[in-house]
Amino acid sequence: MLLRPQITLTMDGAPLANAAVRVEGNRITEIGVGLLPLAGEEVVELPGQVLLPGLINAHCHLDYTGFKGAIFSGIGFSEWIKRINAIKRSFSNEDYLAGIEKGFQMLMDGGCTTVCNIEAIPDLFPLMAKPPIRTWWFLELIDIRSRAFGEEALTGMLDFFEARHDWPGGFGLSPHAPYTASIELYRLAKHCGQELKMPFTTHIAESVEEQEMFLYGHGAMYDFLKGIGRNMEDCGQGSALSHLLEFGLLDEKCLAVHMNYIQEYDYKLLQKNPLHVVHCPRCHAYFNHARFPYERLREAGCDVSLGTDSLASNDVLDLRAEIAQFRKDYPTVSAEDCLRMVTTIPAKQIGMEGQLGVIRPGALADLVAFPLPEQTNPYLAVVAAKGRPTFFMVDGERK
Ligand SMILES: [Zn+2]
């Protein structure tokens, strides 16, 4: 198939005018001005359109798509967790599956072709159809009260994904957060990351309540978790981030989500051990957190991608809306750099550098197009585009 857009944003060099992009199977094979169709090759004309790599959402919980509007903002973080747990108990597997399907559609409507999705209910896996977009399924691990995730369960999950090699994407682990997952779960995630070459992800340094719990050993989260039987010996002893870094448990396989409340000593550790950071701007605004420390994290050597988080703390699953929110706080970050936060940077974070998030020969054919109004910077046109993409392809399949 030969695609002929007006402008191609390869995210791998300057924008190309009137170039054609050839897709064969699930790969991009050629890009250039003057490429002619081969005999019998399908040609897709995209006049007045800008073509770019499909967007990558580095953090989402599709399980919670049906929770939209169920929790009002303005409550504390621990209170929000309690309400989420109450709603979870009222949902059936069918409710969750319907939400996941709807969530995929919302992601696609925003031009997203890859999602890093946390899956908290592994029982849903055997009931699911092949996902319509490239999906990294991160199995959520929590062990506040029950024993840690065992080797048997992990082997079962790996077998499950091996049998679904036609599902585009991958699998990883997600120790939920330092307040819900033990050091043993982080060890397991790191071990699997190293041995099985799979990424892992965790929520960290998200809220003031989490900060109070680990730094000072008090506060609403401390009281809540102590009340349900968590061992609180790790509280009042400095940030959880510093503990995990000092134990060497966060490495290049880890996507550290949120990173909102960072201590000076954390930055010193991050300089020696920079992390892949995922920022969720609209969720950040929902909880009214302190300003996200983008510059400090970048100075420490961390790269920052964007995610939507879930509809329990957001009302859209659209990376363009996340970029718009991010630019309210960081208007000097260019539209091009913002698009890197949803293409090349998350691709690198999940170990897919050069394969996803770029248009170049050999890369996977995940492509989207948006209208390009006359005399508009093409990067800005994508960021400001409102409707669905005018062209959408995942793994060489047009949808
Ligand atoms: Zn999350």
Image (spheres, rainbow, N blue to C red):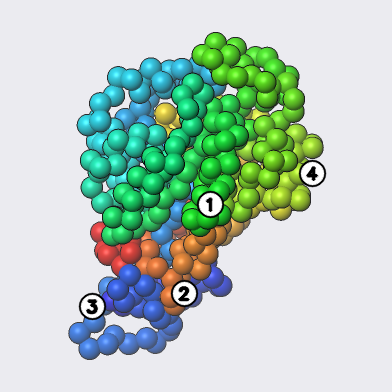
Residue appearing at x 28%, y 55% in the figure: 163
Location of the N terminus by quadrant is bottom left
CB of mark 4 near ligand 1 (< 8 Å): no
Write down the quadrant of residue 87 in the picture: top left
How far separated are the C-alphas under marks 1 and 2? 27 Å
Q: Which amino acid type corresponds to the residue marked 3 in the rendered image?
A: Glu
Circle 2 residue: 360
Q: Which mark is residue 276?
A: none
Classed neighbour count for the residue bearing mark 2: other residues with Cα under 10 Å, few (<14), some (14–19), many (≥20): many
| Camera-side mark, 3 or 4 | 4
Classed neighbour count for the residue bearing mark 3: other residues with Cα under 10 Å, few (<14), some (14–19), many (≥20): few
Circle 4 residue: 268
Q: Which amino acid type corresponds to the residue marked 4 in the rendered image?
A: Lys
Residue appearing at x 61%, y 53% in the figure: 252
| Camera-side mark, 4 or 1 | 1
**Which structural element holds mark 3?**
loop
Circle 3 residue: 42
Circle 1 residue: 193
| Camera-side mark, 2 or 3 | 2
Q: Position of residue 352 (x, y in %)?
A: 49, 62
Q: Are marks 3 and 1 in contact (CB under 8 Å)?
A: no
